Image (tube, helix red, strand yellow):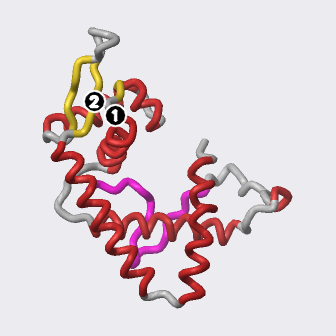
Amino acid sequence: MTNHDTDPGPDRPEPDLSEPDRPEPDLSAAGTLDPATVARLRLVVARLYRQLAQASSGQDLTFAQLSALARIEEHGPVRLGELAALERVAAPSMTRTVTPLVTAGLAARLPDPRDGRSFLVEPTPTGRALLARIRRQRSELLTRRIGALGAADREALGAAVPVLERLLADGD
């Protein structure tokens, strides 16, 4: 899987992605975490994602393709424009993302019954099986890692899940 995050890996320092002409925002009045903790959280999330992606071997999908396939499964059959909106990308970008999924037999195009000029996309059984395998492999990794934690850490992690879900829901 192609990974486009900026995580440098365990042996390299994190690149400086700050904007030199822009000072760090002062979010202390908003009651947010300090910038160092925010940076640690960002790095942990990126590295954990990379490890989860590496745990699901045998697939050559990009992040965008895998995300689109999962959205198609969740919302499909779905029009390409609706899928683009869900993924927050332009329709032409979504066309470039979905075409290889169709070519690989992971998604299928269907005629749109409401608009003969358009089509819907849905996952194929092969696409659904791939998503299930990837989810299983990633869950197995997390289960092993969580199992190695102490009871207090497992409880803290469980309590953090709703907070992390709210971070996703607040996406802008």
* Callout 2 crowding tier (Cα within 10 Å): few <14, some 14–19, many ≥20: many
Quarter of the view holding residue 146: bottom left
What secondary structure predominates along the stretch shown in magenta? loop
**Residue at the far top in the pictured view:** 116
Position of residue 113 relative to residue 143, above or below, is above
- Which residue is located at x 18 percent, y 35 percent? 102
Q: Is disc 1 placed on a helix, strand or loop? A: loop
User: To which residue does mark 1 refer?
Assistant: 76
Q: Give the x, y percent position of residue 90.
A: 42, 28
Instruction: Specify the quadrant that holds the N terminus.
Output: bottom left
Quarter of the view holding residue 41: bottom right
Quarter of the view holding residue 17: bottom right
Q: Which mark is residue 142?
A: none
- Which residue is located at x 22 percent, y 32 percent? 99
Question: Circles 1 and 2: CB distance less than 8 Å?
Answer: yes
In the image, what residue type sits under mark 1?
Gly
In the image, what residue type sits under mark 2?
Val
Residue 10 is one of the magenta-drawn residues? yes
Name the residue nearer the viewer: 26 or 59: 59
Position of residue 9 relative to residue 88, above or below, is below
Q: Which mark is residue 121?
A: 2
Left or right position of 167 against 136: right
Instruction: Report the magenta residues as a range.
Output: 1-18
- Which residue is located at x 39 percent, y 71 percent? 9
Residue 39 is one of the magenta-drawn residues? no
Q: Give the x, y percent position of residue 30.
A: 81, 56
